[in-house]
Structure formats: structure tokens, C-alpha cells
Amino acid sequence: MANAILPHALPSALDAYPGVTLLSLDCFDTLLWRDVHAPRDLFGALGEANLLQRGWAEQTARNNAAVSDRRNEVHIDEIYAELMPKASTAERRAAVQDELDAEARHCFAFEPTVELMRAAKARGIETIIVSDTYLDEKQLRGLIAAAAGEEVAGLIGRIFCSSHYGKAKSEGLYEPVLKALKIAPEKILHIGDNKKADVDGVAPFGVNTLHLKQFTEGTEQRIRLESAISNIFHATEAGLAITHQPHRATIAANEPQMSDTAEVLGYTTLGPALLGFDRWLEEEAAALQAQNGGTVHAVFLMRDGYLPQLVHEARGRTGHAVEISRFTATAASLRTAEEVEHYVQREILSDLRAVAQQLLLPAPEAAKLLKENSRPLPFMRAVQEPQRMRRIIGTSRAFAERLVAHVRKEVNPAKGDTLMLVDLGYNGSVQNDIDSLLAGALGVKVAGRYLLLREQSRSGLDKKGFIGHDDYDCAALESLCANVAVLEQLCTAAQGSVVDYEKDGTAIRRGNSIKSRQSAVRDRVQEGCLRFVRDEGKAIIRAVAPAHEMVMWRRAAAAVLGRLMYVPLGSELAVLGEFEHDINLGVDNTVSLFDPAIAKKGLRQRGLFYMKGAERMYLPAELHGEGLALKLSLLAQRRFAMPLKYQDFVDNSISLPLIVADGNQVSTGNVTATPTHDGYYLAPIPIGDSRFSVGVQFGQLYDYVQVESAVFMPVETFLSDKIQHGTGEIDALPSLEGMDQVAPHLFRCENEFSFMMVPPPPRQGDRPMMLAIAFRPIAARAPAAPAPATTTLMGAVA
């Protein structure tokens, strides 16, 4: 079995080969790496030719060479002759140079490989390049110099290209290489990332070989999924490469040395997203300073701004932690009767207990108000009573003064400065409530800068998102914001949410309802993120700045976050499994991020539409183990706002025979059962106002059937677009006739007359009810054999 080497071990690779006098390296993905996922993704950055045209031209050129010259390797000039058949020689040369320039903008030298080359030079060992490439020696050497610099190019002796010899390493390229080198093969160590080419194609010649494993299998899957998610979120743009992954070299160099799955999650996902965000914040701060003058203060809104602030400071910049929650921002915004009424009208159909608390009513008064006015309209009228309205307004104005004192204490801006509010997002609700307050009280300008921004209204305020309306359509933003809770819980501070301030501005927090174990896990995730920030760039040697750097980091951030939100890995869910989400509205409410057990039941009973109305905050995580197709269906539906309904997913059905009895009459009929998930079907059977008993004649169809559940629910609940599990549901208590339970949920039907009898639940007035049975066919009943025909023997004698 061939030896393999991980990226971080490259600098010491020669230590195990004391007899080696020549170092042979593959070029692409060994010495030169790209900041895109796959080599072909770079073709998106070409001039007028698109990715598919460039690929077709190369394949045609190779086919022609195989037929005419019996060779599989071609030169880039042959490719462009196919790509631009009517162009002049000068035009083709210009197009080739355009591709080389694109490569130089997106390529860099991998630092561990360069360290190996330097170590070889120190030992007096020459380094050569042996590459499968359509470039020639001059072009490849020029590309290395342009991308990595003359110092790196100067470490290379000879270069051997497959385009010159007409065959790849897997086809015997190393045979003419050895002839040219005139050196014993056992004196050579060759290293490359492609096992088939760099080991299987080279080792038979007696050369020492090492397979460079760029990534572990888990990492390879993760970045492959990131690439797929990126393609869903980002349209192809002329002149722009596809699936940017500027973090791939840093991850390759360091992730294999990490064993803590929580730290890995922070390093590989939060790290790239928040580093890109902070680079953008740096650009935005400079733009605000040029526009407004004065000092731009980066003000990180706690609690969710906690990790972004740590990233900001890890990059050597100053940030201010300011504790302003949605609760305190709203409390400070109710300074006029119009603002109070607008708030109550907006929230009147929600929890009135939380509304009363948000109005800062004393507890005894709030309790009395809710007791006497438990319905929305009376509650609204009670709030509008002049005396009560004056108290609410006065309390809010005093609260606002304390909030301003808190900002002054933590930031102390001068008049004319800019407060750049920094948060994860996603609507900028805090800024909506306090923008004018801070601007007026402090004499400053206010701007909001968010990782994700999907405004629910056109606020007219100075707001921007790293991933926001400037670069993404509303459906894309909504699909990311729908699962932002997982990001919030990983970025937040391990402290209670602020609920008030002392007169001097000191924050007053409520108790932290989140488990200490969750905080400990989150600390490790955050440390992984900060480690990535410290490591980023160390594995990269570049001669020029990368192309479209901010576009690259933005797209990478959207891809890694979208991948975590919709296609999380099992190792990541193990980290997040016991997390809860703090709703942060001044009340001690937490909800689970996800619940796989409820999900499995919901999928079998209602299919993917079980998610409607669920209170958990990270629903795509519940699909882990149900297959990639289901996850991508959910993502596509949300990403493109597809107006799909349950019936659009139904392409087959089962006619399930029934017996219906109301005590006086018995009738038979059929109900249509439709597929849900994993082979299960749902049979919805109306039973009126709990009047009818139902006999489900499974025996007519099956020898074996699996019954997942049988529950009664109100018809309006069953038909609702918002499915809330457990609301109004009553477990059925069936009896079995000719059916035996042979395992949990599994039943054997003795014959075609076997059935399950379900009596109705207690009557709830005249409320129409529904019996919903989720079942899965296991073994269909074979059709009865026809009776044997009677045979008359001709000529028989009586």
C-alpha cells in the first residue's frame, strides 16, 4: 500500500528518505493550489467563453489527438483552436494569455510544500516539477512565478509537462523523465495529490512516492457540499470564477491536527464566515469614515455580537461591546403614544404577557390588566387609557436615558462620530428602535452592518449586510435567515440577556437559562473560530492579491453557512445535539434547536410538510439520516420560494377499503391514502362529530402492514397550513380482528377479512373530527389462485 502524507507533514517529508537526492513534485494541488473548489470552476473567470464551452473544447481536442496521433495529452493551443475555430492566431494567443492571467489571479503556492522545497535546497537536493498539464514548460514556469513569486519559482530546477510528451503520468510519463534525468529512480522522491497519477503511475518505475492527501474524507465531503450549496445560491457571472473557497488551504494545513469536533466546527465553518465578515467591516468602516468624517466606532451588539467582536479583536482591531437587546431597544422606543400604539398593534396577536412586560408595566398592574383584558381589543383599549399611556411613555423615556448612558459609558463617542452597530442580523430590529434615539442624544451618525440582512420593511436607515440585498435576492436571504438560530447560539456570549440599566449605564441582566454544558461546548466552538482567524493566510504564498477578494469571501461565507444550515454533518449535529435557543424577549423561554425523534414521526405522518408550524429553530438538522434528496428538496423550495403544496409531492396513492359504522348502520367504502416519507402513507378518514367507528380492512391488501400511528384531530387542524403537533390530537384505541401484532407497529393479517377497528373519541360538541392513520405496506396479499377447472375424460365408460 502506498505511503500517504498529510499537508502539515510536508516540510519534513525528506527525513524518512535519507538516500534521496532529487525531489519531484506534482504542480497543481501540490505546489500550486487554487482558491476555487475544482479546476474547471476557474473557467468561469474567462473572457467570452463560458465554463461548458471551455470544457467541450478541451474534450474535443483530446479526442482528436487520440484518433490522429494516438495521444491523450494536448497543448492549450490545440484547445483554443477548437474553442475559437474562426479566430485569428493573435486572437487565440490573447485568449490563452487571458486564461493564464486568470490562473495567476486565483493560484497560490501552498506554504508547507514551499517549506519542503526550501528544506530540499538546504540539503543540496534539487526540486523538479512533473505535471499533467496542457501548458508547456515555459508557460507553467511563468505561471508559478506570477502566482507565487520569483523566489518560489527559483527553487525549481527542471519542469516536465505531459503536453510535451503526449502522455500523462498514469500512462508512463515518468519513463522519458527518468531518461532525461539520468538518475537512479530510488534516488528520487515524488509527491503528488492524485494517487492514480502520482503513485500508481510513478511507483512502478522504482521511484519513491508519497500521496499527498489534501483533505480527510470528512473534510472532502464538507467542502464538496459547500460547493454544491454555493451553486444553488450564486448565479454564474461572466468573468467571475465559480465556488470560491479561500479557506481551503488553511483548513487543509491545520484541520487534520485537530481532534475536538466542537473546535473543528468553529474552525471550518464559523471561521471562514466571520473572518470574511470582519474583512468587510474593515472596508465599511473606512467608507463611513470617508463619508462622515470623525471616528467610526465598531459597536458590537451583545449577546450575538460577542464572537464577531472577538474575531475583530483577534485581527488587531478595537471594538466596543454594548449590551442592547431587542427587549431593551423596544422598551426605549415607546416614547410617544403613537409609538406605543404601533408596537401594541404589531404584537397584539402574540403573547399578551410578553407585551405587558415589554410595556414596562409593574407586575401587579400587568397581572390585573391581563386578568381583566385577556383578549386583544380590550387589552388595546386598556393600554390607551390616558393615565396608563402617560405612565408607559414616562417609563420608556427614563429607560431610554439609561440606555443612552450605557452607550456613552461603553463607547463615549464625540459629536460627529459614527456608531457602526455590528450584529449577526437579520432585520436590524434593534437599530430600527434606537437609531434616532442615539443620533439625537449623542449627536452621532448611526449605521448598521450585519452578517445577514433581510429587512422586513424599507426602513430608510443606513443598513448593509455582508450577505444582504446588494448581492442576494430576497428568497436567498430568507432561506438563510430561516435557520439563523444555530448561528446565533454559536456566536452568543454565555450570559443572560440585558433587561435594564443602572442610572450610570451599567447593564442589568436576567439569569442565563442556557445549560452550563452548552456554554462549555460553545466556548470550544468559538475558540476554533478564533484559531482559524489566527491561522488564515499562513498556508498561502501569493505574489499578487487574489481576484475579487471580497466577492470571494462573501460567497464562501454564504456557502459555508448555507451548508451548515441545510446539510449539517453528523459530527456537527453531535456537537449541537443538546443546544437550546434563548428567544431573548425578556422572558425565560427556550426551545430546542432540533428534535430528530419528533421529526421522524412527523415525516412519516405528514411528509416534509410536518415542518410547518414547528417551534424548533433548526429544522433542517432533523432531516439528518433521511437522505440528501430530502434536504436538497427543502433547500430548493426555500431558496427559490417555490409555491409547492402537499399534493404536488403525491404521484401515487392507495385506495384503502373501510367499514364505517355509526351504531345503527354499517357501510363500506374506500379512502385515498397518499405517500409521506420512507414508504409510509397517510389515510385521512373523516368521522364527523366523533360519531363513526372505522374498520380499516388492511387484510384485503396486505399480509403484513406497519402502522406508525392512528390519531384523531380536528378537521381544521389537519387542513391547516400551520401544523402544530400535539394540538388537539387524541390517540386512537383500536381493536384487532384477524390481525396479530408480531413486532412493535408490525401486524400480520390472517386473511383478506382481517381489519383494525377504531372506535371514535369522546365527542367535542359538533366539531368535525378526522382519523389520521400513517401506515407502511410490508407484504402485499397475493391474489387468490383461480379454482381448478373440471376436466371431462372423453370415451370414459360409466
Image (cartoon, rainbow, N blue to C red):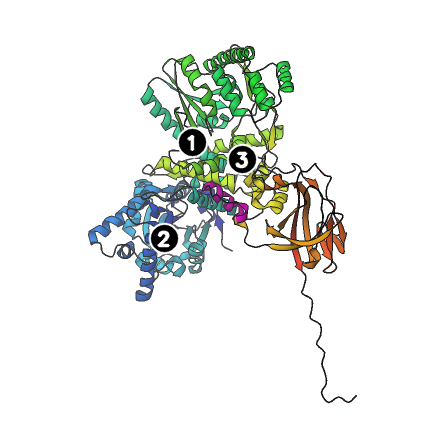
Is residue 7 visible in the rendered image? The answer is yes
Image height check: is 790 above or below 503? below
Q: Nearer the viewer, residue 653 or 495?
A: 653
Image height check: is 693 above or below 60? above
Q: Main secondary structure of the magenta part?
A: helix
Q: Amino acid at mark 1?
A: Phe
Tell me the distance, in whole angstroms, between the alpha carbons under discs 3 and 2: 37 Å
In the rendered image, which quarter is residue 569 located in?
A: top right
- The residue where tag 1 is placed is 277
Crowd band around label 1 with a 10 angstrom C-alpha radius: few (<14), some (14–19), many (20+): many
Q: Amino acid at mark 3?
A: Glu
Asked if disc 3 and disc 1 are in contact, CB closer than 8 Å, the reply is no
Instruction: Pick whichever of labels 1 and 2 is earlier in the sequence.
Output: 2
Q: Nearer the viewer, residue 112 or 514?
A: 514
Q: Amino acid at mark 2?
A: Val
In the rendered image, which quarter is residue 82 located in?
A: bottom left
Instruction: Pick whichever of labels 3 and 1 is earlier in the sequence.
Output: 3
Q: Position of residue 613 (x, y in %)?
A: 57, 37
Asked if disc 3 and disc 2 are in contact, CB closer than 8 Å, the reply is no
- The residue where tag 2 is placed is 130
SS type, badge 2? strand
> Is residue 578 in the magenta section?
no
SS type, badge 3? helix
Tell me the distance, in whole angstroms, between the alpha carbons under discs 1 and 2: 39 Å
